[in-house]
Image: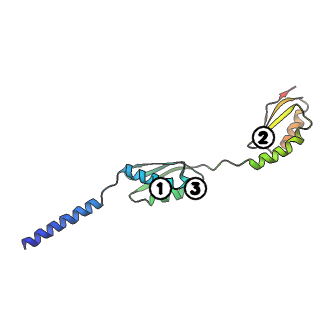
Amino acid sequence: MKTFRLVSMVTLILALGMSATSCKKVSDADLQSTIQTALTTNPDAANVTVTVSEQVATLAGTVQDDTIKSNIESAVAAIKNVKSVVNNLEVVPPAPDYTALDASITEGLAAALKDHKTVTATVNNGVITIEGEIRERDLPTLMQKLSSLSPVQIVNNATVK
């Protein structure tokens, strides 16, 4: 009977010892490294950083839309040993593409400037910048012609005479 008790006690101690080692707490640094590795496989998470404290992952940085923000949060929450996620990601949409607008404006620029030989113009991101010299009475006409090209903005760096 004593042998049975001894064997039972040893078995119980071993079982508790195994369960204690299997519940070993993962360090915050290891968890942070695991999360960062997972995020590097996601191109949408290029501007995302993570910090971990008490197994709570805090996300910071920028993403392009709310769907990506939610997907990254879900992916991090699914990682083993993450208790919770604090999502401080900011949604910043990508900058607009002005390539087509610039091409359209540039196409009409020659006609708008044909009567104003002393004025030059450049187009960048939908903004027309004029330089050179122009008579005061000709400026309103030129500005109307440039406005008809539908730019984002017109910057007048021309000298008015």
Helix, strand or loop at label 2? It is strand
Q: Residue 52: x and y, percent? A: 41, 49
Amino acid carrying mark 1 in the image: Ala
Q: Position of residue 56 (x, y in %)?
A: 41, 52
Give the CA distance from mark 1 to mark 2: 42 Å
Q: Residue at x 22, y 63 (%)?
A: 16
* Residues marked 2 and 3 touching at CB (< 8 Å): no
Quadrant containing the C terminus in the rendered view: top right
Which amino acid type is shown beneath numbered disc 3?
Asp
Q: Mark 3 points at which residue?
A: 66
Q: Name the residue under label 1.
A: 38
Kindly identify the residue that appears in the image at 79 percent across and 38 percent down: 122
User: Which is closer to the viewer, label 1 or label 3?
Assistant: 1
Instruction: Answer with left or right where residue 114 lies relative to residue 66.
Output: right
State the image coordinates of residue 38 (x, y, percent, origin top left): 47, 56
Q: Is residue 49 left or right of residue 67?
A: left
Pick the quarter of the image with the N terminus: bottom left
The residue nearer to you, when weighing 95 against 118, is 118
Q: Which quarter of the picture shows residue 2? A: bottom left
Neighbour tally class for label 2: few under 14, some 14-19, many 20 plus, Cα within 10 Å: some
Pointer 1 and pointer 2: residues touching (CB < 8 Å)? Answer: no
**Callout 3: SS:** helix
Mark with earlier residue (1, 3): 1
Q: Locate residue 83 relative to residue 155 in the image: left or right.
A: left
The tag on residue 123 is 2
Distance (Cα) linking label 1 and label 3: 19 Å
